[in-house]
Amino acid sequence: FCKEDYTRVTLDQFEALKQKRPSDPEPVKFMERIYYNAAIQLLQQKQPWEAGWYFDKVLEMAPGDKEAQSRKEFASRFKPGANLDYPYLRAVDQMQYRRAGCH
């Protein structure tokens, strides 16, 4: 899959491809990106308490992903109704999406 195909492919399709070609790491990499980017988007939308589930999905596939672990720990500090003030916004603003590409 190349980046121009990325938005048309669903997680179910990646899961099916992962099952069909278990030795191919690419479907899992794309799935990790989808979950990671969904979590970052929730952080940017001021819903950090929802982002943890998506970081958990990333960490199921890539337990050694230190960046996802760090972001999950950050998100877990906030509960619904928390004051998401300037330091929160500043931290989230520096978080980058993971980009897809061709290999």
Image (cartoon, grey):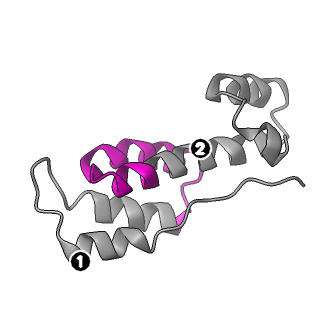
| SS state under label 2 | helix
Toward which corner of the image does residue 12 lie, by quadrant? top right
Report the mark closest to the observer, 1 or 2. Answer: 1
- Compare residues 67 and 80 and report the one nearer the observer: 80
Image quadrant in which the C terminus is located: bottom right
Identify the disc placed on residue 87.
Answer: 1
Query: Can you see residue 103?
Result: yes
Against 80, is 76 above or below?
A: below
Against 93, is 69 above or below?
A: above
Q: Is residue 91 left or right of residue 2?
A: left
Residue 76 percent across, percent down from the top left: 25, 57
Label 2 crowd (10 A; few <14 / some 14-19 / many >=20)? many
Q: Amino acid at mark 2?
A: Ile
Residues under labels 1 and 2: Cα distance?
26 Å
Image quadrant in which the N terminus is located: top right
Q: Is 51 included in the stretch rendered in magenta?
A: yes
| SS state under label 1 | helix
Q: Is 58 included in the stretch rendered in magenta?
A: yes
Q: Residue at x 49, y 42 (%)?
A: 57
Magenta segment: 40-66
Q: Which of the two labelled residues, at mark 1 and mark 2, occupies the earlier sequence position?
A: 2
Give the prevailing secondary structure in the magenta stretch.
helix
Q: Amino acid at mark 1?
A: Pro
Q: Residue at x 21, y 75 (%)?
A: 86
Q: Residue at x 85, y 30 (%)?
A: 21
Residue 73 percent across, percent down from the top left: 32, 63
Residue 47 percent across, percent down from the top left: 27, 49
Q: What residue did someone put label 2 on?
A: 34
Q: Residue at x 44, y 51 (%)?
A: 41
